[in-house]
Image (cartoon, rainbow, N blue to C red):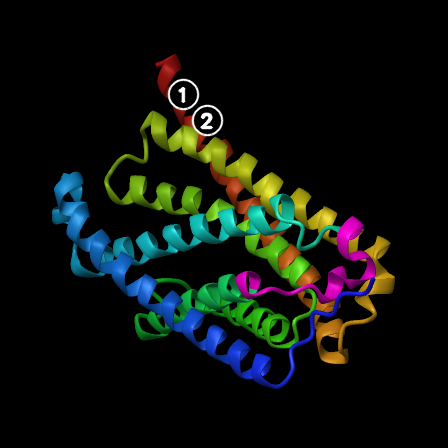
Amino acid sequence: MTTSFAFTGDDDSSKQLVLLASVCSGMLMCKIVYDLTGFISPLLFSAYGKLDGKVRMEWNNRGFSTFHAVFVSVASIYLLVISDQFDESVHGDLVINSTTRLSESVMGISLGYFVADLMMIFWHFPTLGGVEYVFHHCLSMFSIILSVTSGQAQFYIFMVLLSEATTPFVNLRWYLDASGQKGSKAYTLNGIALFLGWLVARILLFIYFFVHMYSHFHQVKQVFPLGFYSLLAVGPVLSTMNLLWFWKITKGLIKTISKATGKKKQ
């Protein structure tokens, strides 16, 4: 029995409405969490009130960045591991074309986040990140748009989105630094967690990404031309960026542990 994941006629209109609503929901989510972060932080962290305006703005921005990372990581684990959407025993060679309203909605919300965050990055450039962040966001948005509109290669998109699981550790490191706790035990432990998380979610996961693409290349070739060549190009580019950032994280961790060890000896 063959299952088709293509949408036609009224389904196309419904799909467009779902995508538009999801993108708007993602942007609204960012606004709500940004405001909530600004409201709650002074009540929980005394250091927040001592920060200048730009730092508080970045603090709030990292609030919705963390929220999105948790949301998309949980959603990716569900779609990749728990649900049968990408189960080859169920769909066979149609896995590359597998798409559902849920997966489209998740990608739409994530797209809304990238749009909102990129707008803030441009508006406050370069406070919230330099050219590498702009490039990363544009590449992510481009890939999501191709996948959600075509209904193809969503398995690989969610593997990449799962790598956002490292973002909370990145943001926590920034929060601890901004609140004057760079020399604390929490900062060191978070650095170790970030190193291990990055190793798993952005190095080992990408190795599996490439191995899976190679072993399922007969499916990958079914992707439409622009999507096919983008899939071949975007993965290596993102993995290269991840390796460069991993090198910086490793150097930072070694430096932090060395300082902590030096203090103990004294």
Which quadrant of the structure image shows residue 227? Answer: bottom right
Foreground residue among 91 and 225:
91
Q: Which residue is at 59% across, 44% downward?
A: 201
Which quadrant of the structure image shows residue 125? Answer: bottom left
Foreground residue among 101 and 221:
101
The kind of residue on which mark 2 rests is Ser
Secondary structure, mark 2, is helix
Q: Is residue 17 left or right of residue 238?
A: left
User: How far from the left and from the top, in percent, is residue 104?
Assistant: 55, 67
Quadrant holding the N terminus: bottom right
Secondary structure, mark 1, is helix
**Mark 2 touches mark 1? (CB < 8 Å):** yes
Give the answer, above or below, for where 251 lies relative to 130.
Answer: above
For residue 262, which numbered disc appears in the image?
A: 1
Residue identified by numbered label 2: 258
User: How far from the left and from the top, in percent, is residue 96?
Assistant: 74, 63
Residue 121 visible in the snapshot: no
**Label 2: how many Cα within 10 Å (few below 14, some 14–19, many 20+):** few
Q: Is residue 131 left or right of residue 79?
A: left
The kind of residue on which mark 1 rests is Gly
How far apart, in angstroms, are the residues tagged by discs 2 and 1?
6 Å
Q: Which residue is at 65% across, 77% downward?
A: 7
